Each structure stands twice: as structure tokens, then as C-alpha cells.
């Protein structure tokens, strides 16, 4: 049986079928190739379009583009697509925290404004180092650089850029505009710019308008910052004037001092914080709100401090008043006790009639003087005085006149002796005198002179002038003397003076 048969399944029929299937195979392959090329082109364009969308994706996109240029080497491409997909996922995870890519925008600007190249490069590095927390800050920094240079320096640059790069730059600019927290007054203008970019308007004029907008915003913010600075400066002055930051109210308590220091520190910290926030702030309204909240806080702190201080001041003053009252009472009590003691002492040692030291005081003083003379080998003289015929005065002129005479004589004796001498009323009409550091002859002279003075003095009783004389016995301390022995010797001399006719001084 021959292979080529003319029936339905003849070999000729089979051949036709074979060629037909080859044709359709070729057609399918062509279709597949066309689709593949189309897919490759689409992916390449897509890769170009999204380039610059995120920095981390760009290397993947470049590699995918390169791989697609040489056709679909499925394994390598699959691997790269998987890596790209993972990078996309990771980007989504960090979308909120990651910084927008502005690489192409910077490239564009550097090419547009070659005279600002170095500044733009520096700014680009600062942006990459994430020094700008807000895209608005980036815009402001850009505005600063381009302030005097709003016209692009190269006109043909846009033509030189690939269409895809222009799109990517537009995308970056759109994203930056979207993320920039533009002041309320400029939001509409920002949206218009975005629309123009989205509608594919030429980048050059849009960018020019964007720079102008940024310059206007910058001026606006400078004004606001100046206003803010003035506001803060007035605020600080007012606080300083109130005197609340510095010394404040006078309270001696250590506790109050500590509290005041802590309050000062709190206020200073709040003010520093405000100054920092104002320096970083780009909009006045939120800053004003912040200042207002802070001021409320400061005010509350001050109020509670003032209340606490007032409470403590009143408490301290009350305690102080009670204490002062107690001290005054104690002072009065002490003064009374003191004067009572002095009175008692005086009563014990003074003669009430003549106000001279009495016999008790004399005995004490004699003991001291003897001890001194004994210890230092100094001289000491004792004189004993007695009024002559005093009984007659009492009897003739009365006891009162006698008392008066005693007082006058006491004064005369005190007046005419030295400060270091000691005069006392021994009892009745008898007086004693101690003369330390005095020799017997000179003491005798002094005593005799005194006797003469008293003799010549005028005494009056019942309107009558009377004459009063005194007799005196003098002796000096000798080693071994005590109060009694020295007194007996002087008294003996007095006795002799009386015996010799009175009105005289004799020594023993
Ligand atoms: N007025 C008055 N008289 C006093 C006081 N103390 C003593 N006399 C009196 O002094 C007198 C002392 O007298 P006599 O001891 O006799 O001595 P005299 O009269 O002074 O005579 P001669 O000492 O011997 O010169 C007495 O009459 C006492 O009463 C006194 O404090 N006041």
C-alpha cells in the first residue's frame, strides 16, 4: 500500500495538513513574538516611567530594563522580577517612614542652575542624610539657594532629558508637593502646580512657578517667624518684669528657696523649649497655639506656687508671731527676775540709809583685798571712822537729824576717796574704808585731809548750824593678817584717837 492515497486520508491530504499546521505555528510564534516585544516595551516604558519613584527600586528597574532589552531570558528575568516584587513589598512596609526620593529633581536642578551646582549638591547630600523632617523645609532651602536665580540658566536642558526622566522628575515634584505641609494660604497654588505636572505640562515653566511659589512662601514664613520672635521676646520681657523667673518673693525658709529654684528651672526649661520650637517652626498659628498651651501651663504652675508660697508664708508668720510672743514673755520674766535678784542682792549688801555697802559687803571685800595683797605683796590700808559724840546729835536734834548727818557723812567719805578705794557703813555711826596699793603714811595723810574736810563742812539741824567731827584709826595689812586681826588693830587706833580727844586720825 502506497503512502500517498487519494481517499480522505490519502498522503496528499496529510501533507496539506502538515503545511497548514506549520503556517499556523509560524503565525502563532509571530503573534507570540509581537506580544512578547510589546510586553517588553511596556515593561521598559513602565520601568522608565516609575524611575525615581523610589531610590531603592531604581537599580531593580534598571536591571529589568537591561534584561528585557536582550529578550526574555525567563529564569534571570523571573528571579529579578521576584527580587523587584520583594523590594516593592518592603517599600510598602516602610512607605510611611521612608523619605521621598528627590535624586532626579536634584539632577534636574543642578543641570538647570549650573552656577548653583555646589550649593545644590550640598543640599542634596543633606536631604539624603535626612536632615529635613518635612519636604517644606527642603523647599525652603531650595528657595534660599535659587532666590536670586529664578530663571533657568540653560534653555535646552529639557530637550536633552529623556521623556521618562522628565516624567520621573515631575513625579518627584508632585510627591514632594503632596507631602509638603504648605501654609494654608498657599495650598491652592500648590495643588495647581501638581495638576499642571499631572497633566504633563512642560517641566520648565511649572518649575519656574514652583520656585516663585517657594520664594513667596519663604517670605511669608520669614514674616511669621519675625512676628513670632517679637511675640516671644515680648513674652520673655513680660515674664522677666513680673520678676517671677528670678528672685521673686522673700521667704527665709530653705524649703521655699528650693521650691523657687525648681520653679525657675521649670520656667527656664519651658522658655528654652519654646525658643527651640519657634526656631524650628514654619507656621505661626500652630506655634501660637503651642505658646498659648505652654503659657497656660506656666500660669498654672505660677499660681500653684504662689498659693503654696502664700500658705507657707502665713504659716511661718504665725509661727514667728507665737515665737516672738513667747520670747517677749520670757524677756519680761527674765527682767523681773533680774531686778528682783538685784534688789535682793542690794538688800543683802547695801545699807538702806546711806546706800553704801554694808558690813557684809565690807567683810567680803576685805577678804578679797587681803588675799590680793598677800598674793602680790601689795600694800593695803584699813581705816575705821567713828562720828564723835553722835549720841548728842541724836539727843539734841532728833533721830531724823542724826540720820541726815549719817547720809551727808557717807557722801563725803565716798566723794573724797579714790575709785579703787572702798567705803562701807560698818554699823551705827561707824564707817570703814579700804585703801588698796596705798602706804600707811600716805593713807594717813588722805584720812586726815578728809577728816578736816568733814570738820569744815556745814551741817544744819532744825535751822541750826552744827559741827560734826570724826575720829579715825588706821592700820596697814601685815603678813598673816586676817579680817579680824587687821580690824582689831585699826579699831585699837580709833580707840586711841577717841582717847586722845577725838577729831583726829591715828595709825597702829
Ligand atoms: N540717828 C541714828 N543714830 C544712830 C544710828 N545708829 C547708831 N546711832 C546712835 O549713835 C549713837 C552712838 O553713841 P555712842 O556709841 O555712845 O558714841 P558717841 O555718842 O558717838 O560717842 P563717841 O563715839 O564716844 O564719840 C547712839 O546714840 C546710837 O543710837 C542710826 O542709824 N541713826
Image (tube, rainbow, N blue to C red):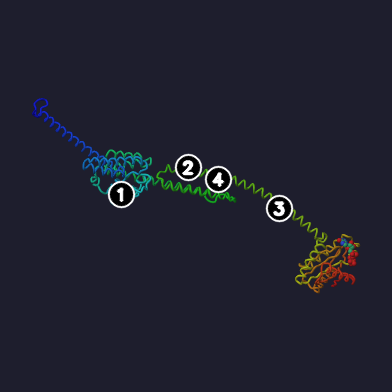
Residue beneath the point at 71% across and 53% down: 331
Q: Is residue 101 above or below residue 399?
A: above
Distance (Cα) linking label 2 and label 4? 18 Å
Circle 1 Cα neighbour tier, 10 Å, few/some/many (<14 / 14–19 / ≥20)? some
**Is disc 1 in contact with disc 2, using a CB cutoff of under 8 Å?**
no
Ligand 1 placement by image quarter = bottom right
Identify the secondary structure beneath mark 2: helix
Query: Is tag 1's residue or tag 2's residue first in the polypeptide sequence?
Result: 1
Distance (Cα) linking label 3 and label 4? 37 Å
Distance (Cα) linking label 4 and label 1? 55 Å
Q: Give the numbered dot on residue 331.
A: 3
Distance (Cα) linking label 3 and label 1? 89 Å
Circle 2 Cα neighbour tier, 10 Å, few/some/many (<14 / 14–19 / ≥20)? few
Query: Is tag 4's residue or tag 1's residue first in the polypeptide sequence?
Result: 1
**From the viewer's perspective, is the residue at label 4 or at label 1 nearer?**
4
What is the x, y in percent for residue 381?
Answer: 80, 70
**Would you name the residue on which mark 1 appears?**
149
Q: Is residue 388 above or below residue 164?
A: below
Query: Is tag 3's residue or tag 1's residue first in the polypeptide sequence?
Result: 1
**Residue ranking furthest to the front:** 1
Asked which quadrant contains residue 10, the reply is top left
Asked which quadrant contains residue 61, the reply is top left
Residue beneath the point at 51% across and 44% down: 299
Residue beneath the point at 80% across and 72% down: 479
**Residue ranking furthest to the bottom:** 441
**From the viewer's perspective, is the residue at label 3 or at label 1 nearer?**
3
**Would you name the residue on which mark 2 appears?**
293
Answer with left or right where residue 324 lies relative to residue 450: left
Amino acid at each position: 500500500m502506497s503512502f500517498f492515497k487519494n481517499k480522505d486520508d490519502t498522503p496528499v491530504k496529510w501533507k496539506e495538513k502538515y503545511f497548514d499546521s506549520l503556517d499556523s505555528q509560524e503565525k502563532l510564534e509571530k503573534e507570540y513574538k509581537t506580544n512578547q516585544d510589546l510586553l517588553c516595551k511596556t515593561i521598559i516604558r513602565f520601568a522608565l516611567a516609575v524611575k525615581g519613584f523610589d531610590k531603592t527600586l531604581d537599580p531593580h528597574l534598571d536591571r529589568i530594563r537591561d534584561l528585557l532589552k536582550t529578550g526574555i531570558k525567563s529564569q534571570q528575568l523571573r528571579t529579578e522580577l521576584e527580587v523587584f516584587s520583594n523590594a516593592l513589598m518592603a517599600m510598602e512596609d516602610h512607605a510611611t517612614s521612608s523619605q521621598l526620593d528627590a535624586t532626579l529633581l536634584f539632577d534636574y536642578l543642578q543641570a538647570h542652575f549650573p552656577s548653583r551646582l555646589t550649593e545644590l549638591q550640598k543640599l542634596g547630600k543633606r536631604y539624603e542624610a535626612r536632615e529635613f523632617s518635612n519636604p517644606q523645609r527642603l523647599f525652603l532651602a531650595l528657595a534660599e539657594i535659587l532666590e536670586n536665580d529664578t530663571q533657568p540658566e540653560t534653555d535646552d536642558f529639557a530637550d536633552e532629558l529623556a521623556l521618562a526622566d522628565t516624567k520621573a522628575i515631575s513625579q518627584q515634584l508632585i510627591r514632594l508637593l503632596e507631602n509638603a505641609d504648605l501654609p494654608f494660604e498657599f495650598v491652592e497654588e500648590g495643588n495647581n502646580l501638581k495638576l499642571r505636572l499631572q497633566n504633563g505640562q512642560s517641566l520648565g515653566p511649572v518649575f519656574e512657578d514652583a520656585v516663585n511659589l517657594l520664594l513667596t512662601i519663604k517670605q511669608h514664613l520669614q514674616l511669621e517667624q519675625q512676628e513670632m520672635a517679637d511675640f516671644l521676646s515680648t513674652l520673655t520681657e513680660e515674664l522677666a518684669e513680673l520678676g517671677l523667673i528670678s528672685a521673686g518673693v522673700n521667704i527665709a525658709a530653705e524649703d521655699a528657696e528650693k521650691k523657687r529654684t525648681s520653679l525657675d528651672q521649670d520656667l527656664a526649661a519651658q522658655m528654652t523649649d519654646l525658643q527651640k520650637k519657634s526656631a524650628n517652626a514654619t507656621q505661626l498659628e500652630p506655634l501660637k497655639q503651642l505658646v498659648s498651651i505652654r503659657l497656660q501651663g506656666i500660669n498654672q504652675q505660677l499660681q500653684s506656687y504662689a498659693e503654696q508660697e502664700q500658705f507657707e508664708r502665713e504659716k511661718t508668720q504665725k509661727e514667728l508671731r507665737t515665737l516672738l510672743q513667747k520670747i517677749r514673755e520670757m524677756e519680761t520674766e527674765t527682767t523681773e527676775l533680774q531686778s528682783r535678784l538685784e534688789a535682793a542682792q542690794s538688800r543683802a549688801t547695801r545699807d538702806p540709809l546711806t546706800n553704801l555697802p554694808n558690813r557684809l559687803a565690807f567683810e567680803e571685800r576685805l577678804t578679797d583685798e587681803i588675799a590680793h595683797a598677800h598674793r602680790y605683796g601689795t600694800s593695803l590700808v584699813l581705816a575705821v571712822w567713828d562720828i564723835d559724840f553722835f549720841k548728842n546729835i541724836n539727843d539734841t536734834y532728833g533721830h531724823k537729824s542724826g540720820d541726815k548727818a549719817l547720809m551727808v557723812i557717807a557722801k563725803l567719805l565716798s566723794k573724797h576717796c579714790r575709785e579703787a578705794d572702798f567705803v562701807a557703813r560698818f554699823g551705827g555711826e561707824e564707817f570703814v574704808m579700804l585703801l588698796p596699793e596705798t602706804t600707811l603714811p600716805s593713807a594717813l595723810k588722805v584720812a586726815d585731809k578728809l577728816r578736816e574736810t568733814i570738820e569744815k563742812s556745814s551741817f544744819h539741824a532744825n535751822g541750826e548750824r552744827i559741827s560734826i567731827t570724826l575720829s579715825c584709826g588706821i592700820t596697814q595689812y601685815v603678813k598673816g593678817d586676817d579680817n579680824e586681826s587687821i580690824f582689831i588693830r585699826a579699831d585699837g587706833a580709833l580707840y586711841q584717837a577717841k582717847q586722845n580727844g577725838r577729831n583726829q586720825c591715828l595709825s597702829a
